[in-house]
């Protein structure tokens, strides 16, 4: 990342710190932290039973469930669904899971226009190159208004002024125009309630509401998003909001429990009144079954990278795809392999533990990375300088 982008990112992060400082230590938030930690621990330990219950709930709610062992499996499922709707364009919401499977590049190669509906993600999409996000909920936090103005003017062939509202309105209109004929929307989910078979999504812009009105709504989520019930799901997303944005609640909280339907004419059930005629959930494993349990506790708030000294120094080169910072490095081992984990910044981490101290669910990321370094060394992935020192010690009883 450029020095100017790092400076802007750090300013954005400081804003989040100030905004959240007044509420994250409140009695209600502390109670919520304890509750969510228990929810995540139970959910990961009892994932198989919750999954069994979820399948029954989805069937009851007329939600189609597809299982994807790998990212390729997920992409193949999505390809088949899009072919059914002859989709040449689709509306996309912000989703780290969709970034994990590289959906945009995959569909771009098939000449399908993936339109980001989140403003920050859309700005990065218009940027075309070097457009990796820097925060889970604030993907363009490293770009100042002057840079964003240039991106929008160059990409959309307009002459917008460096004024936030004017930029927002131009991008919004462009997105809506591109989606006029789109029949498919795709998103992730912040949490999935097993008992009710409901998917919870939080957003401020109202864009997920647009996506859920398309004929087909595809939802891609990891198996780690499953929790026992709707009350638990709401608790998870509320805590995520507090630590991600510094607000108690977002503007919108969508709970999707099936396709759009009505029974107002002689109690005959009709689908597709205003919203989706089909809701298809692609439940993704992609290494999660083999992952260190604590890695799966993550609620996606991004508070770890906000406080990480390494991330604040080097930016999003520390991490893997949309999974940023140390937790992203850790997940890359299970999603990809040891070499990817090494290249994602396994040895960048200082092991200072600030990520854990600032994680609402206390993921011991520094301990996980320390253990992974040993495993990585055992299979031959470690800094060359360390290898020379090891060899010198072995041959000369000295590092020199």
Image (cartoon, rainbow, N blue to C red):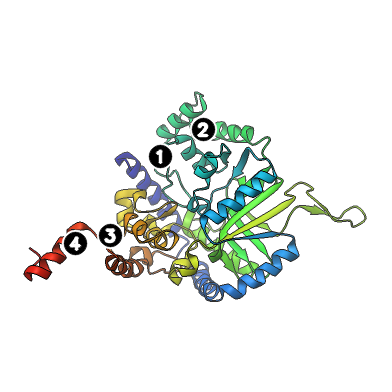
SS of the residue at dot 1? loop
Quarter of the view holding residue 22: bottom left
For disc 3, the neighbor class at 10 Å (few under 14, some 14 to 19, many from 20) is some
**Numbered mark located on residue 347 in the image:** 3
Whether pointer 1 and pointer 3 mark residues with C-beta atoms closer than 8 Å, the reply is no
Quarter of the view holding residue 336: bottom left
Whether pointer 4 and pointer 2 mark residues with C-beta atoms closer than 8 Å, the reply is no
For disc 1, the neighbor class at 10 Å (few under 14, some 14 to 19, many from 20) is many
Alpha carbon separation for disc pair 1 and 3: 27 Å
Alpha carbon separation for disc pair 4 and 1: 36 Å
| Residue at 17 percent of width and 58 percent of height | 385
**Numbered mark located on residue 167 in the image:** 2
Alpha carbon separation for disc pair 4 and 2: 49 Å
**Numbered mark located on residue 143 in the image:** 1
Give the vertical position of 362 relative to 320 (above or below).
Answer: below
Instruction: Let me know if residue 329 appears in the view.
Output: yes
For the image shown, how many numbered marks are present on the structure?
A: 4
Residue 158 in the image, given as x and y percentages of width and height: 51, 24
Nearest-to-viewer mark from 2 and 3:
3
Quarter of the view holding residue 338: bottom left
Compared across the picture, whether 6 is left or right of 87 comes to: left
Residue that carries the numbered disc 4 in the rendered image: 386
């Amino acid at each position: 990342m450029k020095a100017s982008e790092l400076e802007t990112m750090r300013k954005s992060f400081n804003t989040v710190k100030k905004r959240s400082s007044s509420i994250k230590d409140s009695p209600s938030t502390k109670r919520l932290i304890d509750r969510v930690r228990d929810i995540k621990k139970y959910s990961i330990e009892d994932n198989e039973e919750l999954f069994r219950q979820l399948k029954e709930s989805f069937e009851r709610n007329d939600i189609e469930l597809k299982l994807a062992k790998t990212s390729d499996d997920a992409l193949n499922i999505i390809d088949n669904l899009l072919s059914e709707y002859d989709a040449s364009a689709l509306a996309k919401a912000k989703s780290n899971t969709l970034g994990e499977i590289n959906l945009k590049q995959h569909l771009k190669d098939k000449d399908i226009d993936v339109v980001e509906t989140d403003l920050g993600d859309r700005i990065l999409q218009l940027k075309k190159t070097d457009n990796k996000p820097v925060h889970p909920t604030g993907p363009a936090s490293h770009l100042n208004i002057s840079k964003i103005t240039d991106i929008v003017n160059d990409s959309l062939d307009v002459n917008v002024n460096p004024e936030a509202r004017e930029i927002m309105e131009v991008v919004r209109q462009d997105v809506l125009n591109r989606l006029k004929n789109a029949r498919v929307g795709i998103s992730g989910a912040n949490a999935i309630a097993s008992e009710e078979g409901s998917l919870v999504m939080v957003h401020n812009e109202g864009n997920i509401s647009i996506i859920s009105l398309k004929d087909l709504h595809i939802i891609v989520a990891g198996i780690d998003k499953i929790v026992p019930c709707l009350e638990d799901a709401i608790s998870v997303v509320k805590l995520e909001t507090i630590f991600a944005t510094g607000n108690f609640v977002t503007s919108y909280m969508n709970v999707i429990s099936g396709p759009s339907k009505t029974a107002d004419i002689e109690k005959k059930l009709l689908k597709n009144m205003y919203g989706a005629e089909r809701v298809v959930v692609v439940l993704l494993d992609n290494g999660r079954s083999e992952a260190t349990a604590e890695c799966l506790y993550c609620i996606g708030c991004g508070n770890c990278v906000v406080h990480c000294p390494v991330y604040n120094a080097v930016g999003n080169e520390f991490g893997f795809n949309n999974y940023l910072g140390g937790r992203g490095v850790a997940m890359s081992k299970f999603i990809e392999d040891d070499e990817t984990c090494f290249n994602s910044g396994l040895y960048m981490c200082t092991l200072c533990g600030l990520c854990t101290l600032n994680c609402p669910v206390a993921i011991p990321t520094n301990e996980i990375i320390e253990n992974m370094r040993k495993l990585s060394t055992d299979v031959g992935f470690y800094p060359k300088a360390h290898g020379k020192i090891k060899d010198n010690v072995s041959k000369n009883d000295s590092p020199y």
